[in-house]
Image (cartoon, rainbow, N blue to C red):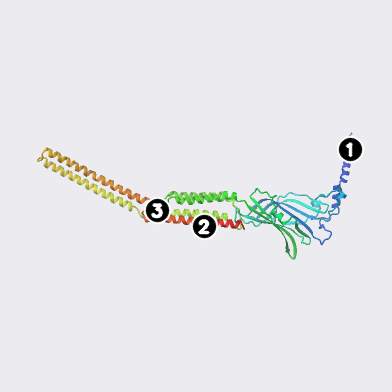
Amino acid sequence: MVSHLFLYLLSGGFAYTASLQNSTLLQLMEKLLTNYNKGVRPVKNWTQPTTIYIDFVLHAVLEVDGQNQKLRTNIWYQQIWMDEFLKWNPTSFDGINEISLPIESIWIPDVLIQEFIDVGRSPYMPYVYVNSSGHIKNYKPIQVVSACRLEIYAFPFDKQNCTFTFCSWLHTVNDINLKLWRSHEEIENNTSAFVDDGEWELLSVPSKYEMLYNEGREYAQIQFNVIIRRRPLLYVVSLLLPSIFLMLVDVTSYFLPPNSSGRITFKSSILLGYTVFRMNLSDDLPATAMTTPLIGVFFAVCMALLVISLIESILITKLLSMNEEAEPMTAVSKCCVSKLISSNRSTTDSFCTSLKTQEGICDDSVSDSDTETPGQHQDKILNQEAQALQIKELPVKEILKEISSIKFYLYQLEDPTNPKNDWLAFCYRFDTFLFRVYLVILGVYTITMSTLWLIWSNP
């Protein structure tokens, strides 16, 4: 039983080997690769150059590194060329018009990207397609880390123009020539394959063919210009709008009274909040060693304006305090003291007069009590009491009058809307002047920054 099973398996193995040897694909591959030398350019006439057709499709922008001036992208790359040693008659091989061959077994052109600086995570494609006429199609997605001169000055309203230059590393144009597989217009306007849901927007991919002259030799090269634009909405909401709102709040703080202590406290809180805001969002700004972005200048000038505004408020407060130090108890105290002294003197005199009057009345009453009749004596006592009441009411009225005058004087002195003091009026006018100068500087700064961003975002 075991011997029958062994014979069955052995016969099956021979049948599979025979069928494999009789395979048309295997026969075709053996015919094409037998005596094939992949180290020789595949032309029968060595004076005839091999034309490489190139197609380029940008699929995604993965990273834009402004500090290191490099761009990481994912592209779909295609090479098509003619191999005169890989031709066959389809009728001789069961009508097979196309076959896949291992890429290590055939000649591959040395077409590279000049801006290439690092190896990306590209998938390995081990095969190429070959048709019966000898045309080879090498399709492969590659991840390219290339050098690019990135202009971050207009961030976040910037556009970038990065080049991908394809050329043969060793062969001159007499050996390898390059051509576009599609037309210039079709390549430039084809953005359908681009992943358009990220930070960058693909505008166009213009291309051109040119010759490179080096040491008396000519090299063919094709250059693709990838023009992309950043979507600025995220950075406008997270960076620019908070800064603008804080500047507007600082402008409204000028409507607080200059002599109010809360004005300096309020401006100091705004400056502190802006500093914390800048520290938290420092990682969102692009880092570049070549130029300072406009947004960095914008933040620096905004902080400088906040500092200037705070210094102006401190200066006004100092001027107002100098007015108070220059009049140590002069206007109010002298008035109050003089009026109080006069009030005391008048009160003392009144009381003395009343006492003297009462003493005289008492003496007269004692001296005349014996000679006057009882009726006349009673009328005289009533007249003396009326005169005493009038004398007592006089100092009270005088004191109330003096207090009312002092109160009115203090109200006029401390009224901020109608200052009688010349120094106080000067401080108010100076504060208004500085506020207008601050508004002019802020307006000029806003127009300048908007103009620069508009110019650099549309070069």
Amino acid identity at mark 1: Tyr
Residue found at the very far top of the displayed protein: 1
| 272, 247: nearer the viewer | 247
Amino acid identity at mark 3: Ser
Q: What's the distance in space between the residues labelled 1 and 2, CA to CA?
A: 96 Å
Locate residue 84, reporting x and y percent: 83, 56
Relative to residue 278, is residue 200 drawn left or right?
right
Q: Crowding at label 2, few (<14), some or many (≥20) Cα neighbours within 10 Å? A: few
Q: Which residue is mark 2?
A: 444
Q: Are marks 1 and 2 in contact (CB under 8 Å)?
A: no
Locate residue 128, reporting x and y percent: 79, 51
Q: Earlier in the sequence, mark 3 or mark 1?
A: 1
Q: Secondary structure at mark 1?
A: helix
Relative to residue 92, is residue 162 drawn left or right?
left
Considering only vertical position in the picture, is 9 above or below 240? above
Q: Earlier in the sequence, mark 1 or mark 2?
A: 1
Locate residue 374, reporting x and y percent: 12, 37
Q: Secondary structure at mark 3?
A: helix
Q: Which residue is mark 3?
A: 321
Relative to residue 210, is residue 67 drawn left or right?
left
Q: Which residue is found at the position 59% from the left and 58% from the top?
A: 455
Amino acid identity at mark 2: Val
Q: What's the distance in space between the residues labelled 3 and 1, CA to CA?
A: 115 Å
Residue 154 found in image quarter: bottom right
Q: Which residue is mark 1?
A: 8
Residue found at the very far bottom of the displayed protein: 216
Q: Which mark is residue 428?
A: none
Residue found at the very far front of the displayed protein: 185
Q: Secondary structure at mark 2?
A: helix
